[in-house]
Amino acid sequence: LVGLGGVLVYRHYDTNKRVIRYEQETALIREAQARQEKDMEAARAVQQTLLSPTLRFPECETCVHWMTADQTGGDWYAGHFDRKNKIAYLFLGDVTGHGFASALVTGLAHGAVTSVFKMYENESGSAPDEMLLRIARAVNHVVFESASRSVRAMSMICIALNSQTGELHLLNCGHPQVYRITEDHIEALVSSGPLLGFHDDPEMVVKRHTLSHGDRLFLYTDGVIENGRSAGKGISFAKLRKVLRQPEKTVDLIHNELIQMLKSTWQGAPVEDDTTFIVMQWQASRPRAAPTGQHAGGTGFSVPVQ
């Protein structure tokens, strides 16, 4: 009996040690998770500061919707207006994958674009096609350098629109096509090029188009089409065209209808990829109200307010 009692005491002592060790390890894991969550929140806050909630260009009305699959993502956009030459620049990029690592690459892309505009801000004679090439090469350089370590690439659409004449310069770096919506039809502005980050000096070609008063442009990342497909709830191009081909409705209304279509179609399906779309209308002589603001919620934001 004495021996049995000793065994029971030992087992009780050993069990207590295991419980204490488990509780200590659990506490450490929770602390690490809390720190990681805090870091991710900080990273998301930084990423959102790089993404302007409004894209304001003279003679244009522009709405954007941005949503990430995780707290941070690989979709990125930027706008810049050259007041001297009356050129509206618009960029939309998509880094492969999503999450924190992809978000870091979008930060590099943002810095590259900002640096190029700062470098050439005093040049009055910079042609828009030259600026697009400079910017694309700068972004390619930073993505190429980071991709050599993280195995990531980036697709990007680069647009330069003359707000006075409607002349449009378009550079496509492996991105889904831009759609032009007129009063009676929708067409893809077909343009192609290599993804950024695969080669140190890829060949790029800028194409030219001319918009008519009231024409709209639709830019998007592939999450718009790809999300929901695994659950049989993907968005078809036919559904997209049905919403986009409503010239009687404002860009604001089209923007909101697109968001509602995505939500209703994807209901219950996992959002596996970042999602961004931009609707832009050139209306040279029509007075417009200023964008109505920012809507934040979930893992993205939209402009204007829904």
Image (spheres, rainbow, N blue to C red):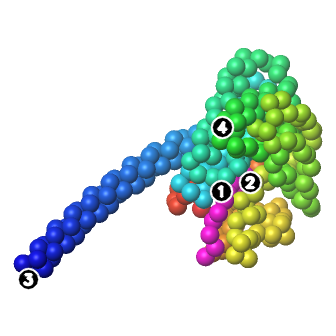
Q: Which residue is mark 3?
A: 1
Q: Residue at x 73, y 43 (%)?
A: 153
Question: Which marked residue is nearer to the observer: mark 1 or mark 4?
Answer: 4
Quadrant housing the C terminus: bottom right
Q: Which residue is mark 2?
A: 221
Q: Residue at x 80, y 63 (%)?
A: 244
Q: Foreground: 236 or 37?
A: 37
Q: Earlier in the sequence, mark 4 or mark 2?
A: 4
Give the magenta part as a residue range.
Answer: 268-278
The secondary element bearing badge 4 is classed as: helix
Q: Residue furthest left?
A: 2
The secondary element bearing badge 1 is classed as: loop
Task: Kindly identify the amino acid type of the residue bearing the numbered disc 4.
Answer: Arg
Q: State left or right for residue 250 relative to residue 8.
A: right
Determine whether label 4 and label 3 are within 8 Å by CB: no
Q: Which residue is mark 1?
A: 274
Determine whether label 2 and label 1 are within 8 Å by CB: yes
Q: Residue at x 15, y 76 (%)?
A: 8
Q: Residue at x 91, y 46 (%)?
A: 191
